[in-house]
Amino acid sequence: MRSLPMKFILIILLLPVTSFSQDISGVWVGNMYNDTTRENIHYELAINQSDSKVDGYSHTRFMINGVKNIGVKEVNIRMKNDQFYVVDEKFVYNNNTEPPAKGVKMFSDLILSENDSAQVLSGSWKTNATKIYRPLTGTLFLEKKKKIKPAETIIVAKLIQLGLADKLSFLSANVVSNNIAANNNTAAPQTNMGTVSTSAVNEETNKQEEKIKEKKAKEELARIEQTKAQEANGELARSEQIKAQKAKDDSLKLEQLKAQKEREDLAKAEQIKAQKAKD
């Protein structure tokens, strides 16, 4: 059997790894769990994939004292087979109540898989340590949106507002051109169906926030029920333990009284016997 020419082997080896990988372009929506605070934070990724370059934007939202803190960052992504390394870069937008931590980046190590309904990116994340901040850790779970509608994805709506719609290669040309035209003509009423109004973004944000609140309420109710069940089980166990101890004490006391009576009867019998012998 003839061996493959060396030139052909070299061509195969020099092909980029991503040419054999799946296309992950699009919007990924899910939650980021923080091991320290034990909270789930709504997290979205908008990923662009072209040839060997993969980048995009991340969107996080969490509450501090009733205020929604929103952060949008550029991200760089490295791929190897079904494994993805996501690294935060600079902020393109934030309204944090406190200045973002300087020198802190988030690094995510994610695996691509599929469930019954969607593609999934899941894995762990961590931040680097600085002189001021300790490293944080947690997990990520994201599902890919099959159909992207700007008004239904917080990150796309926000990027359109920021004038970054043209950076999203997976959006249709009509959506991009319509929104660029709307941004260039802010004085005119925005009647284009391709644009996303602030009210639409706020409405979707509120919906997501309500879902998170509802989920937290269910989790809190489940925790309370579990605590009640544990307390009830503990109280029952203590009651059974007390009953068992009382039964044991009563039995021991009865045995002691019985032994005491037998000793007294024996002593009395011996005394009567001795008296008769004396008489």
Image (cartoon, rainbow, N blue to C red):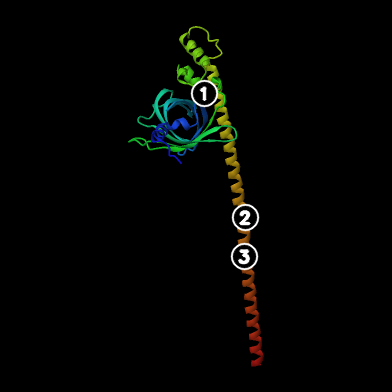
Which mark's residue is nearer the viewer, 1 or 2?
1
Q: Residues within 10 Å of mark 2 (few under 14, many from 20)?
A: few
Residue in front for this viewpoint, 258 or 9: 9
Amino acid identity at mark 1? Ile
Image position, residue 265 (x, y; %): 65, 80
Q: CA distance from mark 3 to mark 2?
A: 14 Å
Residue in front for this viewpoint, 222 or 134: 134
Secondary structure found at label 2: helix
Q: Is residue 250 visible?
A: yes
Q: Residues within 10 Å of mark 3 (few under 14, many from 20)?
A: few
Q: CA distance from mark 1 to mark 2?
A: 54 Å
Residue under the image location 64 percent in, 82 percent down: 266
Amino acid identity at mark 3? Lys
Q: Which mark is residue 248?
A: 3
Amino acid identity at mark 2? Ser
Residue under pointer 1: 154
Query: Mark 2 or mark 3, which is nearer the start of the sequence?
Result: 2
Residue in front for this viewpoint, 200 or 192: 192
Residue under the image location 55 percent in, 18 percent down: 200
Q: Quadrant of the C terminus?
A: bottom right
Query: Mark 3 or mark 1, which is nearer the start of the sequence?
Result: 1
Residue under pointer 2: 239
Secondary structure found at label 1: helix
Image position, residue 100 (x, y; %): 39, 28
